[in-house]
């Protein structure tokens, strides 16, 4: 299972690197959630904040905000 998680993380990080995709909220949310699973709290917060900024009033931004609040932002 760990290998699949790392593969998913690598894939989402590649998406974020593509300039045309860098404004998409979902890859940041997914990266943040993977980092949460890996207990990388600071990395998770950074990506969740980017997801929230990219979709502040949408469902992805709201989900990111819920996780951020649970982490104490």
Image: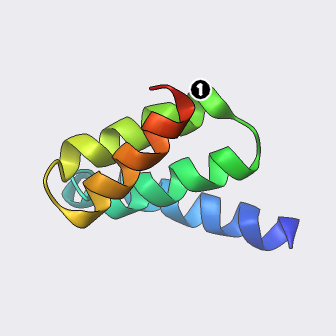
Q: Is residue 57 above or below residue 50?
A: below
Which residue has dot 1 on it? 42
Tell me the residue at 22%/40% (across/down). 53
The crowd level at tag 1 (other Cα within 10 Å; few <14, some 14-19, many 20+) is: some
Picture coordinates of residue 48 (x, y %)?
Answer: 42, 43
Q: How many marks are shown on the rendered structure?
A: 1
69 vs 62, left or right, is right
Picture coordinates of residue 2 (x, y %)?
Answer: 86, 65
Picture coordinates of residue 21 (x, y %)?
Answer: 26, 60
| 50 or 14, nearer to the observer | 50
| 27 or 72, nearer to the observer | 72
Q: Quadrant of the C terminus?
A: top left
Tell me the residue at 77%/73% (across/down). 4
Tell me the residue at 75%/39% (across/down). 39
Mark 1 element type: helix
Q: Is residue 47 above or below residue 14?
A: above
Picture coordinates of residue 55 (x, y %)?
Answer: 19, 53
| 19 or 73, nearer to the observer | 73
Q: How is the image coloured?
A: rainbow
44 vs 40, left or right, is left
Q: Quadrant of the N terminus?
A: bottom right
């Amino acid at each position: 299972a760990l290998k699949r998680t790392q593969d998913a993380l690598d894939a989402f990080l590649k998406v974020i690197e593509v300039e045309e995709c860098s404004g998409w909220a979902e890859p940041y949310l997914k990266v943040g959630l993977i980092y949460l699973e890996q207990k990388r709290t600071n990395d998770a917060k950074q990506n969740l904040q980017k997801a929230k900024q990219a979709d502040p009033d949408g469902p992805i931004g709201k989900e990111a905000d819920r996780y951020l609040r649970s982490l104490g932002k």
